[in-house]
Image: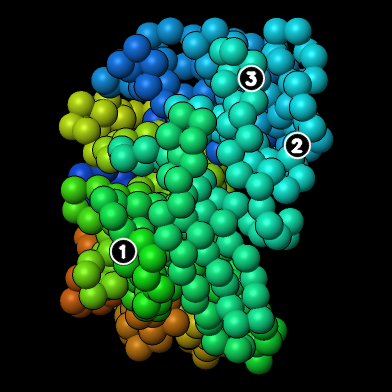
């Protein structure tokens, strides 16, 4: 019995430390696997790609189809409604950072920086300067001409000859058909011309012009159409910034074809912090039942990182008639997320940077997908483990802060040693109790550096309720004292050793429970 009681002084603290680590791991697992937003699933891993490019999406025989580049070429995955793979097709093509492709019914074509090629024969079809692989068909630009390309027939048809070879071309595909927008920069602003493409015919829909502030210049244009009107999103960049940082601004307008847009500035509030989203890019605009929706990547708050902070994730913003935005986060990963693509109103895909291979991930608002993604995964366990180990390591900083606490009982013991050495020799109990009391008074008076407002804001609710610092200081003191008295008698420890054990255990408990949230 004596030997068993002696082991309690090490067994019980070990159990308490394991409980603290388990609670920390559970808390971190919830953070790293937190769904991006209410009503959206966690990320589903559907493939890897060596090239940072957006995947191609579409419908194949009524089923969702996602095609992306691999080391050896193209992989096409065809899914059921729960996004479980039904069929896979592979096509061998050379792959580099400029590779794009289009999968037709009977043929696959691909393009690089210089030309377009037949996948099966490898023969070059034509030179090009830009490639536009839409869902229903492919288009390309060669010098100042825009062509439609029938993949199955391997036939090109000229659609439009650009009067200004410096004009930029944008294409969009909606439920109403395929649309083309040309943008020319003039001395008075930007001149836009809208067209609709039907088979191999192109019809002008209207012209418009707009200008931005003299201190800004247009950096990107995205558009879509609905009935007889267009929706326009303009990204500008500030020419000169006092801070030296690149500053972007975003403007939205909706107008009938033939009328100039009335651009209104739009802002994007981070739905998970009090700040605005930063560095917004990879923008696209879509029409839905709820109105125009923007899909983009942005730098916003996430708790998935080792230290919660800002990271690039995928967002969507619904635009109201007053140009106000309601932002929803669609991805929540610790990696750099980019190239969002909309498969349908309920599903988006994107690419997460990952070294040599990049993950292709999917999120959906469909209940069956949310349920499927709500499972314990190896990736989630690894992320939670890494975050836990990192937080425990940084939590050792609590040992430095605690020196302000045990300094005073140390000075007390030195004073007793030189002034009343007989009290130490006779193991007077008042020496132990006085040392404990001095330590606790020091811990309570100097608790602010350990239990700062920032720590309490980061800590979970079971550690950060009102009055929790004093309660845990006294509670852990009671536990340490109870363990000490349960095992110290069998050890025949002197008062200095008992006081050292008490202080050591108390600091250990504070460190493993509160230390991880210090930084």
Between label 2 and label 3, give the one nearer the viewer. Answer: 3
163 left or right of 434 in image:
right
Disc 2 and disc 3: Cα gap in Å?
15 Å
The answer to which of marks 2 and 3 sits earlier in the sequence is 2
Residue 463 seen in this snapshot: no
* Residue positioned 66% across, 52% down in the render: 162
Where is residue 244? Give x, y as percent.
69, 84
Between label 2 and label 1, give the one nearer the viewer. Answer: 1
The answer to which of marks 3 and 1 sits earlier in the sequence is 3
Binning the other alpha carbons within 10 Å of mark 2 as few (below 14), some (14 to 19) or many (20 upward) gives some
108 left or right of 173 in image:
right
> Circle 3 sits on which residue?
155
Image quarter of residue 188: bottom right
Binning the other alpha carbons within 10 Å of mark 1 as few (below 14), some (14 to 19) or many (20 upward) gives some
User: Is there a contact, CB below 8 Å, between mark 2 and mark 3?
Assistant: no
Where is residue 30? Give x, y as percent.
32, 45
Disc 2 and disc 1: Cα gap in Å?
33 Å
- The image's mark for residue 128 is 2
* Residue positioned 31% across, 38% down in the render: 175
Q: Which of these two is toward me, 205 or 299?
A: 205
Binning the other alpha carbons within 10 Å of mark 3 as few (below 14), some (14 to 19) or many (20 upward) gives few
- The image's mark for residue 210 is none
166 left or right of 428 in image:
right
The secondary structure type at the circle numbered 1 is strand
* Residue positioned 51% across, 31% down in the render: 200
Image quarter of residue 79: top left
Where is residue 71? Give x, y as percent.
71, 21
* Residue positioned 71% across, 15% down in the render: 118
């Amino acid at each position: 019995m004596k030997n068993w009681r002696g082991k309690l002084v090490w067994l019980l603290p070990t159990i308490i430390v394991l409980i603290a680590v388990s609670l920390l791991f559970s808390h971190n697992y919830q953070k790293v696997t937190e769904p991006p937003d209410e009503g959206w699933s966690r990320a589903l891993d559907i493939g890897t790609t060596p090239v940072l490019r957006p995947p191609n999406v579409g419908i194949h025989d009524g089923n969702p189809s996602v095609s992306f580049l691999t080391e050896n070429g193209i992989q096409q995955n065809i899914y059921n409604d729960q996004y479980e793979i039904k069929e896979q097709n592979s096509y061998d093509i050379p792959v580099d950072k400029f590779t794009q492709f289009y999968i037709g019914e009977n043929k696959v074509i691909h393009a690089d920086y210089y030309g377009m090629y037949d996948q099966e024969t490898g023969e070059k079809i034509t030179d090009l300067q830009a490639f536009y692989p839409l869902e229903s068909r492919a288009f390309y630009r060669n010098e100042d001409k825009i062509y439609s390309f029938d993949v199955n027939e391997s036939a090109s048809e000229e659609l439009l000859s650009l009067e200004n070879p410096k004009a930029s071309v944008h294409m969009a595909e909606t439920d109403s058909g395929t649309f083309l927008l040309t943008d020319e920069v003039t001395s008075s602003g930007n001149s836009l011309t809208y067209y609709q493409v039907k088979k191999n015919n192109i019809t002008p829909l209207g012209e418009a012009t707009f200008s931005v502030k003299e201190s800004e210049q247009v950096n990107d244009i995205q558009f879509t159409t609905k009935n007889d009107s267009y929706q326009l999103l303009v990204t500008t960049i500030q020419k000169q910034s006092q801070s030296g940082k690149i500053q972007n601004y975003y403007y939205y307008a909706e107008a009938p074809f033939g009328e100039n847009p009335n651009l209104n500035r739009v802002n994007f509030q981070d739905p998970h912090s009090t700040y605005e989203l930063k560095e917004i890019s990879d923008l696209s605009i879509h029409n839905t039942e709820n109105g125009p929706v923007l899909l983009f990547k942005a730098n916003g708050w996430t708790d998935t990182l080792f230290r919660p902070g800002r990271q690039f994730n995928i967002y969507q913003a619904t635009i109201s008639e007053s140009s106000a935005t309601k932002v929803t986060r669609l991805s929540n990963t610790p990696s750099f997320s980019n190239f969002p693509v909309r498969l349908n109103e309920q599903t988006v895909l994107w690419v997460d940077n990952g070294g040599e291979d990049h993950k292709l991930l999917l999120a959906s608002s469909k209940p069956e997908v949310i349920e499927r993604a709500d499972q314990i995964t190896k990736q989630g366990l690894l992320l939670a483990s890494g975050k836990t180990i990192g937080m425990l390591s940084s939590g050792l900083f609590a040992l430095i802060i605690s020196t302000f606490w045990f300094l005073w009982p140390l000075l007390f013991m030195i004073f007793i040693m030189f002034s009343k050495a007989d009290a130490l020799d006779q193991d007077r109990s008042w020496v132990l109790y006085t040392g404990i009391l001095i330590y606790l008074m020091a811990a309570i008076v100097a608790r602010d550096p350990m239990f700062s407002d920032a720590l309490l804001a980061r800590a979970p609710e079971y550690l950060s309720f009102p009055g929790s610092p004093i309660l845990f200081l006294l509670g852990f003191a009671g536990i340490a004292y109870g363990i000490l008295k349960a095992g110290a008698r069998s050890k025949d420890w002197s008062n200095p050793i008992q006081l050292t054990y008490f202080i050591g255990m108390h600091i250990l408990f504070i460190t493993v429970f509160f230390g991880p949230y210090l930084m």
